[in-house]
Image (tube, rainbow, N blue to C red):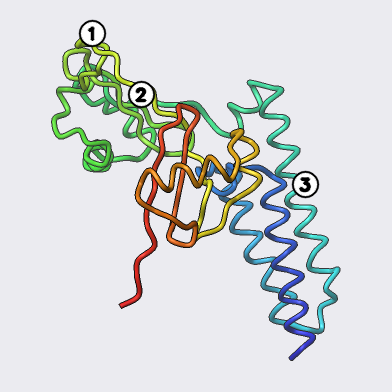
Amino acid sequence: MFLLFIRTLLVYAAVIGGLRFTGKRQLGELSTSEFAVTILVSELASIPLQDTAVPLLGGIVPLATLLAVEVLLSYLCRKSRRFRKLLCGNPCIVIRDGQFDPQMLRLLRLSPEDILDGLRMAGVSNIQDVRYGIVETNGQLSVILHADRQPMTPSDCLLHPKEVGLATILVSEGKILQCNAQQLGKDEQWILQQCRRHGISSLQEVFLMTVDDQDNLFLQRQERAV
């Protein structure tokens, strides 16, 4: 049992490390080749776990080979537009000026209902509001609305709202994250000063404190035990 436990941890570490090495897209939107690699990785990883007679190296080598091939394909896709088109295909326009393109739908083997589902997920209820509907190479539907149907922005009203930066955690459950504090140029004295402004006398009372590069502060107290 202990040997099986160790083998499981090693295979798990190899799979996670390999997927991290191939890039972020492996953990998000998957192309056809990436989806195939994900399926094969799961199958290959299960072999040394189910059969302890199989050498551990015999399970990890195919995993490493498969992930190395995926990295090579990604590199070739970046360098060659023709190879990328061959491997991933091209985006396909399925809606033009509020009208379906039946020929393109047949080519993609999609029904109008499939596209309408995608429109609803994008928050669009009326197909006539759509100027272009595009099926991307990863299978997602991108929607471009007519100009008069697009949401109004503050700049359309000649407004200039205050910028909001990227929030960084300074205090989490009563503990200062020193690395983040140093990155933002904040010290413990500044943090305690902000706590006192919000009626908090001790860091132990802070559940979460974040601040962004515009000095917008968010602070939440710890919940008191009943």
Q: Choose the circle earlier in sequence order: 2 or 3.
A: 3
Q: Which mark is residue 93?
A: 2
Check disc 1: other Cα within 10 Å, few if <14, some if 14-19, many if 20+: few
Which residue is depicted at the point 35% across and 46% down? Answer: 198
44 and 154: which one is in front? 154
Q: Quadrant of residue 91?
A: top left
Mark closer to the observer (1, 3): 1
Q: Quadrant of residue 54?
A: bottom right
The image position of residue 192, as x and y in percent, is 50, 47
| Residue denoted by label 3 | 68
Check disc 2: other Cα within 10 Å, few if <14, some if 14-19, many if 20+: some
Left/right of residue 212 with respect to residue 144 in the rendered view: right
Q: Choose the circle earlier in sequence order: 2 or 1.
A: 2
The image position of residue 40, as x and y in percent, is 64, 59
Instruction: State the quadrant of the N terminus.
Output: bottom right
187 and 70: which one is in front? 187
Residue type indicated by callout 3: Ala
Q: Mark 1 and 3 residues: CB-CB less than 8 Å, in contact?
A: no
Q: Secondary structure at mark 3?
A: helix
Which residue is depicted at the point 27% across and 36% down? Answer: 122
The image position of residue 32, as x and y in percent, is 55, 43
Q: Secondary structure at mark 2?
A: strand
Residue type indicated by callout 2: Ile
Which residue is depicted at the point 35% across and 34% down? Answer: 141
Which residue is depicted at the point 74% across and 84% down? Answer: 4
Q: Which mark is residue 158?
A: 1
